[in-house]
């Protein structure tokens, strides 16, 4: 089971947890959960005026072995206007624009856009 909690925080709200959303998806091959500004296709959506987040920005997809992968989808621009960082077990790493990384099973972490 993939469980995501998203806190949409602006600089003025730093430290606040207002705007929290939650979504979950079963760890079944082919399951998909998307994050972005387009509410019609994204289970977790950011404010419409966050133009640094693509309409469909991140995709979590469950592979055939039940492992989840995080993909930063390429948007309409050749270069990103944000960055995506993944922190798991105290280790942070950047996710490449258009890149995909596997998520560890049974763990927890943080993704910052």
Image (tube, rainbow, N blue to C red):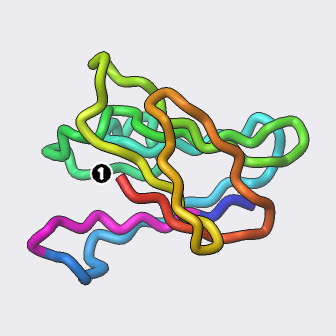
Residue 54's place in the image compared with 6, above or below, is: above
What residue lies at 75% left-to-right and 54% top-to-bottom? 26
**Residue 10 part of the magenta-drawn span:** yes
- Residue 112 in the image: above or below residue 48: below
Question: How many dots with numbers?
Answer: 1
Residue 60: percent from the left, percent from the top? Answer: 61, 44
Residue that appears at 40% across and 33% down:
56
- Nearer to me, 62 or 92: 92
Asked if the magenta segment contains residue 84, the reply would be no
Task: Check disc 1 and report the residue beneath it.
Answer: 46
Up/down of 107 relative to 60, above or below: below
Q: Nearer the viewer, residue 104 or 36?
A: 104
Question: Residue 77 sits in which quadrant?
Answer: top left
Q: Quadrant of the rendered structure where residue 104 is?
A: bottom right
Drawn side of residue 51 relative to residue 63, left or right: left
Q: Is residue 55 left or right of residue 99?
A: left
Viewed as shown, does residue 112 lie left or right of 78? right
């Amino acid at each position: 089971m993939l469980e995501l909690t998203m806190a949409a925080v602006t600089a003025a709200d730093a430290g606040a947890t207002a705007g929290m959303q939650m979504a979950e998806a079963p760890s079944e091959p082919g399951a998909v959960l998307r994050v972005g500004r387009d509410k019609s296709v994204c289970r977790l959506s950011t404010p419409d005026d966050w133009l640094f987040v693509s309409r469909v920005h991140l995709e979590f997809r469950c592979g055939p072995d039940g492992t989840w992968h995080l993909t930063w989808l390429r948007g309409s621009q050749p270069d990103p206007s944000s960055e995506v960082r993944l922190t798991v077990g105290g280790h942070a790493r950047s996710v490449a624009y258009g890149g995909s990384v596997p998520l560890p099973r049974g763990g927890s972490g943080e993704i910052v856009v």
